[in-house]
Amino acid sequence: MRDIGIGILGFGTIGTGVVKGLQENGDLLAERLGARPVIRKIADIDLESDRGVDVDPSILTNDAAAVVDDPDVHVVVELIGGTGIAKDLVMKALEAGKPVVTANKALLAKHGKEIVKLALDKQVDIYFGASVGGGIPIIRALREGLVANRVESIDAILNGTCNYILTKMEEENMAFEVALKKAQEAGFAEADPTLDIEGHDTAHKAAILASLAFGMEVPLDSIHVEGITGVSDIDMKYALQAGYRIKLLAVIKSGDGEVEVRVHPALVPLNHVLASVRGVYNAVLVRGDLVKTSLLYGRGAGMEPTASTVLGDVADVVRNIVCGSPCRVPAVSLLAESRVMKDMANIESRYYMRFSLKDEAGVVAQYSEVLGRHGISIASLMQKEENEGDSFVPVVLVTHKTVEKKVRAALEEIDALPTVGDKTVVLRIEEQE
Amino acid sequence: MRDIGIGILGFGTIGTGVVKGLQENGDLLAERLGARPVIRKIADIDLESDRGVDVDPSILTNDAAAVVDDPDVHVVVELIGGTGIAKDLVMKALEAGKPVVTANKALLAKHGKEIVKLALDKQVDIYFGASVGGGIPIIRALREGLVANRVESIDAILNGTCNYILTKMEEENMAFEVALKKAQEAGFAEADPTLDIEGHDTAHKAAILASLAFGMEVPLDSIHVEGITGVSDIDMKYALQAGYRIKLLAVIKSGDGEVEVRVHPALVPLNHVLASVRGVYNAVLVRGDLVKTSLLYGRGAGMEPTASTVLGDVADVVRNIVCGSPCRVPAVSLLAESRVMKDMANIESRYYMRFSLKDEAGVVAQYSEVLGRHGISIASLMQKEENEGDSFVPVVLVTHKTVEKKVRAALEEIDALPTVGDKTVVLRIEEQE
């Protein structure tokens, strides 16, 4: 049986998972592939830490570039992350005609165009299945299984940290800060959780999915991003009373030659399939013109689930090497059909609004008039008994479908009224269509 | 751009979906593949019916064998179904070195070994993604995405007809016969629904999944099969009171060198992810040693979702033709590791039992004694108030985990007691591990 040399860049959590996976299931994989992936070199800055796997010290090195150059390394697995040295090494490997497997979402989201172009020019494979959704095979589905579909929309929970925090907040009636601390203690949030909780990690993943779905470049700065730091336990409670759960969603839609990609906390109806995704789980709901609704659900992160997908990609590359079929599936199929990114001000949605209003006669009429004048119609209204202590009372409503810019204009006006206390909280609602 | 000739055998619902899909999304697919699948011939007995698609009459024929022989047909898509002529045509195509895409679960489940062997001998592709789960990419996941995993178990809802009937029974408090009639009226059940409601359709699919998961032949007659005709609305109600929903499941497990594959109605806890699969939807819950839990959910049948998967397979074959990489992914990776099918009498489960007992002193003690003597311990017990009209009362219990043969022995004894009315109803419970 033929050996295929693997070089691993980055011996962190995922790298360790890949090494363990190959050690434990290498024979099985070899039988299934008809060729054996063999780890030739592992590069990391830290060669001392005990990672709980037995590795021949002679294959460990500090010199990542040398791993790429090693003639016995046929496949480069990049698990360093970030857009610094990782980018240089990926480009170097592709330049040398070596296929790359990576789990690096930031790299793909920021430099995908350049990387994919080089891979195409050199006719060499780049696989990135683990960059979105950990163990969830969404990238494979978009590149292969759903290839005959015109994708209509993708709604997804793509960040386990945020979903864990939101689940805790709801289930245990916790404030955001408390739930974040719990997540950090449980190892589900980093010491610096900014990338996750501000929504940027989800935005990176959304950019990759949208690029694949629509065959176009999706610049990160064209994505509207809101994180979950502004989600309060109060809104979570009111949302639940109104039949909704709050989730951090990536919303990707196409229509009329426009593509919208946005990341924000959203209210989803309790019977929405994404409402039942709890804790660190991720899920991706794809709608295609043929397949209709397809949901993929699983572990969106973690050592072993992510290693499962990295090794699935390694298997693809090994098969392509054995069959002499590099670039059998292009990294991204750029389509001729031209679409533009939709301006966030023009998106349509239903909205949840929580006003803080003076408890006086005529106040509700006043803000209703403003909403009405901006063409926003109210679907249901809840006046809350709770007193906010300073004569302001919370009023919660849900609108019919309207346009974002109308909401912005109306709220600017409302928030300037003297009868309004705290700034109005506004959250979008995503229905299951 | 290169044209790849497609020959379609069977112009029924799925065949129509495939033709429509290629007509509507053919340009998109060609762009993504770099080659254009072109329908050269369509064979069917019925060339008259209006199928709502525009097809050049000159490509229609009654002569399916001639389609396979046509030198301009490079890929044969078999959508006839069954194990008669469909088998001959598939074998003929493989024999001639033409790749085959099929959605035929019965053919694969019954003659998979022979077909796969011929495909391997001839080094020609056979793809069968649509044979299980319609639009759900479970076969692709097992053959490719999860290739580095040791599969531990698969729990799946694979028959939309049965799931629709069970959902109706529960939601609208219907008897089985009434729900079946509703399903037939709604077009979700065939005039002769035997294959579906007796569980055989699910068993065919389970055999295919188990073969792929464990790399072994899984004879149909080694699968324990019970359908849903014996599921009563009474048990559905009691199950719900105890926190369970009744689903027709395919249960596939591996352990200690043994594989169990069984199809039967099962109680699943309400918080089990499969409990929320309603109506005609299907779902497959896979557990692998690396990926942990992965759920794929979607339309398990229907013209367009199934066509989506058939066309995904056609795309794979086209890519293999373009790249000269036939058999890049073997149809089934037969593994050296030897496993045997587990005897159904030895499976372990928790059980739901509904006894019909004489309403007399000492009766409960009597049957409890029998259960205890057979080593079956009771986890919870509900005595129902309902009078069955003839002095028998229903007693419902849930056992701790035990072995099937103990249950069989105990019930044989209990059902022979003079204090027992109707035969005891017994259903297995599947927990989410």
Image (cartoon, coloured by chain):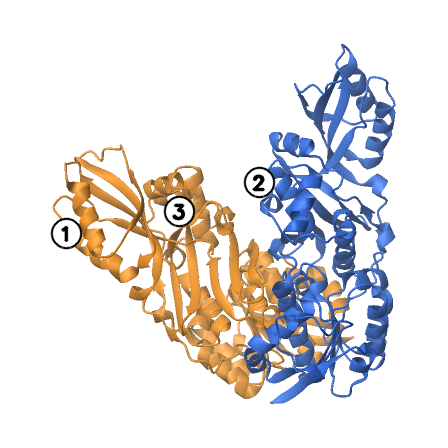
Chain colours: A orange, B blue
Res B190 visible: yes
Could you tell me the amino acid type at mark 3? Leu
Q: Nearer the viewer, residue A409 or B365?
A: A409
- Residue at screen point 51% across, 64% down: A132
| Quadrant (top left, top right, bottom left, bottom right) of the N terminus of chain B | bottom right
Marks 2 and 1 on same chain = no
Determine whether B393 is above or below B310 in the image: above
Q: Is the residue marked by circle 1 packed among few (<14), some (14-19), or many (20+) residues within 10 Å?
A: few
Determine whether B83 is above or below B173 in the image: below
Q: Residue furthest bottom?
A: B1
Determine which quarter of the picture holds residue B15. bottom right
Q: Nearer the viewer, residue A415 or A47?
A: A415
Residue at mark 1 to residue at mark 3: CA–CA distance: 32 Å
Residue at mark 3 to residue at mark 2: CA–CA distance: 25 Å
Could you tell me the amino acid type at mark 2? Asn
Q: In the displayed structure, does residue B320 sit left or right of residue A129?
A: right
Determine whether A35 is above or below A49 in the image: below
Marks 1 and 3 on same chain = yes
- Residue at screen point 65% across, 87% down: B3
Disc on res. A416: 1
In the image, residue A30 lies at what x, y percent?
A: 74, 68
